[in-house]
Image: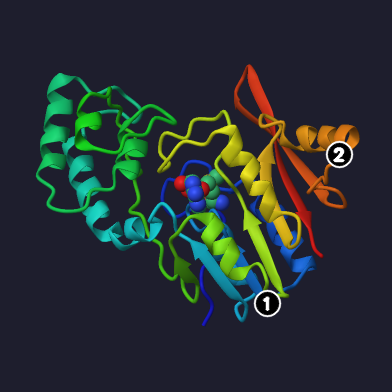
Amino acid sequence: MTFKVYKSSPMPFQGQKRRFINQFIEVIKKNPSKIYVDLFGGSGLLSHVTKSVYPDAKVVFNDYDNFSQRLANIPKTNQLLNDLRTLNIDIKRGEKLNATQRERVLQRINEENGYVDYITLSSSLLFAMQYVKSFDELSKSTMYNKIKMTPYSAVNYLQGIEVVRDDYRKIYETYKSHPDVVFLIDPPYLSTDCSSYENYWRLKDYLDVMLCLYENSYVYFTSNKSNIVELCEWIESNTGGLNPFSGATTQTMRVAPSYNSSFTDMMIYKFV
Ligand SMILES: C[S@@+](CC[C@H](N)C(=O)[O-])C[C@H]1O[C@@H](n2cnc3c(N)ncnc32)[C@H](O)[C@@H]1O
C-alpha cells in the first residue's frame, strides 16, 4: 500500500520546513541510516518525509507542541470551520469581519466543547503570521475571512513513526550513543516571532543546542538572522574552541517574507 507523501504540514504550523523539504529529502537519500531522531519535531514534517524515504528505519518525532493532538482533532476542527464558512458565506475572501460578523463567529467558537485548535483558527481568521492560543486572545483580535475552502486531512501522516514528547536534551541523551543515529535539529529561530510556540528562546538556549552537534550525524537548520555560524567560526579562529560546523556542508535558500525584507535560511549537515 502506498501512502500520500506530504511536502508541507497538513495543518498550519509556523516554522515548518516546507521550503527546504525537497533539498532535505535529497540529503537523507544520499546518506541512509537506520535511526532518525527529530529533536524539535514541530509539525512532524521532517519525521514524516524521512519515514516515507526509509519505511524500515526507526523515526522518532519529538512532538513537543503536541501536534498529534491537533491531528487527532481534525474532524472536530473541520466541523467548526465548516460552520464558520457557512456563517461567513456572504463575506469575500480576505475581507475584514464587521462587529456583527465577528460576534457570531466568536459565539459559534464559544459553543465548542473540549479541544479547540486555536492555531488553525488563527490561520483561518487572523492577519498573516498572527497566532493566538485562547478564546480570550481571539476575542480581542481583528478578524478576516481566510477559512480554507477544503477540509484538513492527514491520513497516515504519522504512520509507523514513534512519537515522544520531552525536552530535546533528554531525547538527545537517550539516543546519542546509538551508532547509526542521525539527529534532525530544527530549533526555534532566535530573533523571530515564536508566539505560537510553547516557550521563548534566548541566546543561551540556542547555544546549548550546539552541544548536540559535536559527536553525531546531524541535519541542522538555522538562518543568517541568528549569526550562529559566524559566531562559531569566530570562536574557532580566535580562541581555538571547537566549531561544531567544521567539516559540515551548507545549503542556503533566500526567503523574502515581504517586498523589502529578506533573509537566508540554511540547512547544514554532517554525517560522521
Ligand atoms: C522551527 S520549529 C520546528 C519545525 C519543524 N521542523 C517542522 O518542520 O514543522 C521548532 C520547534 O521546537 C519546539 N521546542 C521549543 N523548545 C523545545 C525544547 N526544549 N525541546 C524540544 N522542542 C522544543 C518549538 O515548540 C517548535 O515546535
Relative to 83, residue 170 above or below:
below
Q: What residue type is labelled 2?
A: Glu
**What residue is rendered at 54% in x and 78% in y?**
2
Compared across the picture, whether 126 is left or right of 256 comes to left
Report helix, strand or loop for mark 2.
helix
Q: Nearer the viewer, residue 207 or 154?
A: 207
Q: Where on the picture, by quarter, is residue 93?
A: top left
Residue indicated by mark 2: 236
Look at the numbered disc 1 and give the secondary structure of its residue. Answer: loop
134 or 109, which lies in front?
A: 134
The reply to whether the C-beta atoms of the residues labelled 2 and 1 are less than 8 Å apart is no
Measure the alpha-carbon separation of dots 2 and 1: 32 Å
Count of number-bearing discs: 2
Q: Is residue 85 depicted above or below 44 in this figure?
A: above
Could you tell me if residue 258 is visible in this image?
yes
Across and down, in percent, residue 112 comes to 13, 48
Horizontal side, residue 231 vs residue 82: left or right: right
Quadrant of the rendered image containing residue 97? top left
User: Tag 1 or tag 2, which sits nearer the N-term?
Assistant: 1
Q: Give the amino acid type for the residue marked by disc 1 in the picture.
A: Lys
Question: Which residue is pictured at 52% across the width and 61% down the height?
Answer: 170
Instruction: Name the disc covering residue 34, or none.
Output: 1
User: Is residue 56 positioned above or below 67 on the image?
Assistant: below
Quarter of the C terminus within the rendering: bottom right
Is residue 19 positioned above or below 41 on the image?
above
The image shows residue 179 at horizontal and vertical percentages of 73, 75
